[in-house]
Image (cartoon, grey):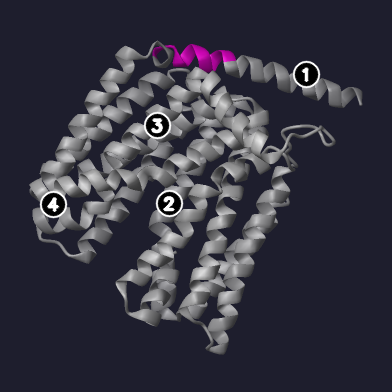
């Protein structure tokens, strides 16, 4: 992603080109997410991941060949970025579903914490690696690294056991019927619906602070782009620490307390960060804030995966992805407030609103208060199902 934006700037020298590059990735991710989830629940998931990863590897290989021959144009970047955006809604739900199948319900939360930690580590290590490669060698070398990493990822997937939500040959509905069944499943399964809505709270209300970070850095600490880069890196490190904390806690049954506590702590730490006058001291509350939101989202996502039936796991994963795709909508009210009242006031108001909404959610929703019991029941049911499936395979 970093390398693609650098090339777009080199080719056009226009800031709008950077917006176009991000837009052609985001749009298909939003509109294809439910289709990707429905396909995930219809086919063998490992093959779907491998096919998607091969598409992205071929994409990067195509750009690499154009770089080597000197024929790369901006529209090539747009087309390949769009294709990559189309592949991700199929890869990510399938990967989440495979994770649940591989590790089982007893270790799912820990496994998702490892996955979240890897993604947060990539937020820090990825740009640093590619920035070093580009500075030391060239942009072409960066694409060589990218293709090589995708080849490794594809080879690793061949070591994962096959995963399918339904036995081969099971009669299937029309694709649109499968998509609509995903929405009706959420509507009927109240604990899943509540978890999805609760997970949106920090993402919509306070997490958009990242989009006005450059404004905050300038107004609060008179820092430029380098300062923003440091803050983003600190956020990534905090996310890694949050994942490590969940891994060390293991698959505890006290999920509700963790979700509530870390979401409120995220709002409080973020408010302290915005009001800290010393730039370097502000690293501490920023790291803690990202640590808390990472832990909260990991436990929330794991709870959803534990609550749903395997036959709809891909579609539920897509809904979780869709929430991330819609998160940028939350940037608009925060940006408007920042323009009118300043970035510090806007972030503080968002933090207060987040804490108030979490409290209201807890006192109004009995389903949320009973989350631990619902998840425990779902885990017990899933364990029985897996035992029955293993027994059936042994008989065959």
**Marks 3 and 4: in contact by CB < 8 Å?**
no
Name of the residue lying farthest toward the right: 396
**Marks 2 and 1: in contact by CB < 8 Å?**
no
Sequence-first tag of 3 and 1: 3
- Look at the numbered disc 4 and give the secondary structure of its residue: helix
Q: Which residues are magenta?
A: 369-377
The residue sitting at 48% across, 37% down in the picture is 113
Residue, disc 1: 388
Q: Nearer the viewer, mark 3 or mark 1?
A: 3
Sequence-first tag of 4 and 3: 3
The percent position of residue 21, horizontal first and vertical second, equals 42, 66
Sequence-first tag of 4 and 2: 2
Q: Check residue 199 in the rendering and tell me which mark sits there, or answer none.
A: 3
Residue, disc 4: 339
The residue sitting at 60% across, 81% down in the picture is 65
Residue, disc 2: 121
- Look at the numbered disc 1 and give the secondary structure of its residue: helix
Q: Main secondary structure of the magenta part?
A: helix
Name of the residue lying farthest toward the bottom: 70
Relative height, residue 270 to residue 27 (above, below): above
Sequence-first tag of 1 and 4: 4
Category of crowding for the residue at label 4, using alpha-carbon neighbours closer than 10 angstroms: few (below 14), some (14–19), many (at least 20): few
Q: Nearer the viewer, mark 1 or mark 4?
A: 4
Measure the alpha-carbon separation of dots 1 and 4: 59 Å
Measure the alpha-carbon separation of dots 4 and 3: 27 Å
Sequence-first tag of 2 and 3: 2
Category of crowding for the residue at label 1, using alpha-carbon neighbours closer than 10 angstroms: few (below 14), some (14–19), many (at least 20): few
The percent position of residue 182, horizontal first and vertical second, equals 59, 31
- Look at the numbered disc 3 and give the secondary structure of its residue: helix
- Look at the numbered disc 2 and give the secondary structure of its residue: helix
Q: Do we see residue 281 in this rendering? A: no
């Amino acid at each position: 992603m970093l390398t693609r934006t650098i090339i777009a700037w080199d080719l056009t020298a226009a800031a709008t080109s950077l917006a176009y590059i991000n837009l052609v990735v985001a749009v298909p991710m939003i509109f294809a997410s439910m289709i990707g989830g429905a396909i995930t629940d219809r086919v063998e998931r490992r093959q779907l991941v491998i096919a998607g990863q091969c598409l992205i590897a071929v994409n990067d290989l195509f750009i690499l060949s154009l770089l080597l021959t000197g024929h790369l144009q901006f529209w090539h970047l747009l087309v390949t970025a769009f294709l990559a955006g189309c592949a991700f809604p199929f890869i990510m739900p399938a990967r989440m579903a495979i994770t649940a199948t591989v590790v089982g319900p007893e270790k799912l939360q820990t496994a998702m914490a490892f996955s979240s930690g890897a993604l947060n580590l990539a937020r820090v290590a990825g740009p640093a690696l590619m920035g070093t490669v580009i500075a030391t060698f060239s942009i072409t070398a960066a694409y060589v690294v990218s293709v090589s990493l995708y080849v490794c990822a594809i080879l690793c997937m061949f070591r994962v056991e096959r995963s399918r939500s339904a036995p081969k040959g099971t009669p299937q509905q029309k694709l649109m019927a499968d998509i609509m069944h995903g929405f009706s499943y959420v509507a009927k399964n109240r604990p899943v619906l509540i978890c999805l809505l609760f997970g949106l709270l920090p993402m919509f209300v306070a997490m958009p602070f990242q989009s006005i970070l450059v404004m905050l850095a300038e107004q609060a600490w008179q820092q430029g782009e380098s300062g923003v880069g440091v803050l983003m890196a600190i956020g990534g490190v905090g996310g890694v620490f949050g994942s490590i904390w969940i891994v060390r806690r293991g698959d505890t049954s006290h999920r509700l307390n963790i979700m509530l506590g870390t979401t409120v702590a995220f709002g409080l730490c973020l408010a302290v960060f915005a009001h800290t006058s010393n730039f370097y001291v502000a690293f501490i509350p920023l790291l803690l804030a990202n640590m808390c939101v990472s832990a909260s989202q990991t436990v929330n996502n794991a709870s959803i995966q534990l609550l749903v039936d395997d036959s709809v796991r891909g579609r539920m994963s897509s809904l979780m992805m869709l929430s991330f795709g819609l998160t940028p909508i939350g940037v608009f009210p925060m940006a408007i407030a920042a323009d009118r009242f300043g970035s510090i006031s806007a972030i503080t108001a968002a933090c207060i609103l987040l804490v108030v909404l979490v409290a209201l959610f807890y006192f109004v929703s009995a389903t949320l208060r009973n989350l631990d019991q619902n998840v425990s029941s779902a885990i017990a049911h899933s364990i029985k199902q897996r035992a029955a499936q293993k027994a059936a395979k042994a008989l065959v």
